[in-house]
Image (cartoon, grey):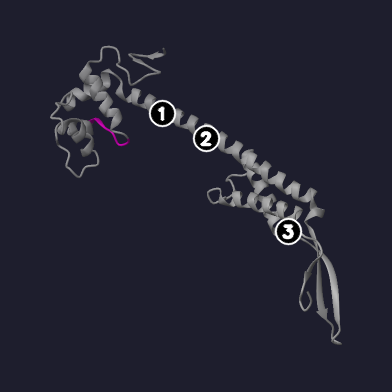
């Protein structure tokens, strides 16, 4: 237990040496007032001097007014004495420091979870893209199209096309790269996945393309004039 002066440095909200129940109660009220707290505000609240429109009126109403509970003191001088004697300002600063560190730790933990999720999502997209590229031949389809020449003759053209678009594949690879760059802090912001719907859509599209390509038909005919 680290002790700074009369109070516990690791637990500054605990009772300081010699601090009475009333003094401690007033200190905890002081802490709970939140940003904008002051001894003057605390004393005014204890003396029912706050207007109902005051932002902190509800704080005192719930703790004292509605319960007809007597405050620790109504003396501004006593509050000032307790504050100096039991180092309220220093303890409040230490409480803020501890809370800030705790929030930072929570943010760091969540950031690590998001970074890992981004990395794994990027790997999944890359895997789908590689599966598509590796099985490229299975995604080809032969199309026969009949056209009419200037002389009025009909000719059949045979060509091969992919059963997908380059744009779909490029978008998936770009998103995968952005996800993984963000995961290793090479990108300030993660890509906009619109609540995950874009990522799910990309994977779903690639799954559909892979399934469709492997089960697709060859030798299709565009009957622009013929069956």
Magenta residues (range):
35-39
Circle 1 sits on which residue?
A: 99
Q: Is mark 3 on a helix, strand or loop?
A: helix
Residue 37 in magenta?
yes
> What percent of the width, then of the height, locates residue 66?
15, 33
> What percent of the width, then of the height, locates residue 29?
25, 28
Q: Nearer the viewer, mark 3 or mark 1?
A: 3
Q: Is residue 214 left or right of residue 17?
A: right
Q: Is the magenta stretch mostly helix, strand or loop?
A: loop
Q: Can residue 52 be seen by looking at this rendering?
A: yes
Circle 3 sits on which residue?
A: 166
Q: Which residue lies furthest to the bottom in this view?
A: 151
Say which of 13 and 162 sits in front.
Answer: 162
* Circle 2 residues within 10 Å: few <14, some 14–19, many ≥20: few
Q: Residue at x 39, y 17 (%)?
A: 9
Circle 2 sits on which residue?
A: 110
């Amino acid at each position: 237990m680290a002790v700074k002066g009369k109070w516990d440095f690791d637990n500054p909200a605990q009772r300081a040496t010699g601090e009475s129940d009333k003094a401690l109660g007033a200190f905890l009220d002081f802490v709970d007032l939140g940003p904008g707290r002051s001894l003057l505000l605390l004393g005014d609240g204890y003396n029912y001097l706050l207007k109902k429109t005051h932002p902190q009126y509800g704080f005192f109403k719930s703790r004292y007014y509605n319960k007809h509970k007597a405050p620790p003191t109504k003396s501004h001088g006593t509050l000032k004495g307790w504050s100096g004697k039991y180092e309220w300002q220093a303890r409040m600063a230490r409480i803020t420091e501890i809370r800030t560190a705790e929030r930072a730790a929570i943010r760091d933990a969540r950031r690590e979870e998001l970074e890992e999720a981004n990395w794994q999502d990027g790997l999944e997209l890359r895997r789908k893209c590689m599966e598509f590229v590796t099985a490229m031949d299975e995604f080809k389809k032969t199309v026969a199209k009949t056209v009419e020449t200037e002389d009025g003759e009909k000719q059949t053209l045979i060509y091969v096309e992919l059963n997908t678009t380059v744009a779909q594949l490029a978008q998936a690879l770009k998103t995968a790269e952005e996800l993984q760059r963000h995961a290793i802090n090479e990108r300030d912001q993660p890509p906009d996945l619109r609540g995950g719907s874009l990522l799910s859509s990309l994977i779903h599209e690639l799954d559909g393309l892979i399934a469709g390509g492997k089960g697709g038909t060859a030798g299709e005919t565009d009957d622009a004039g013929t069956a």
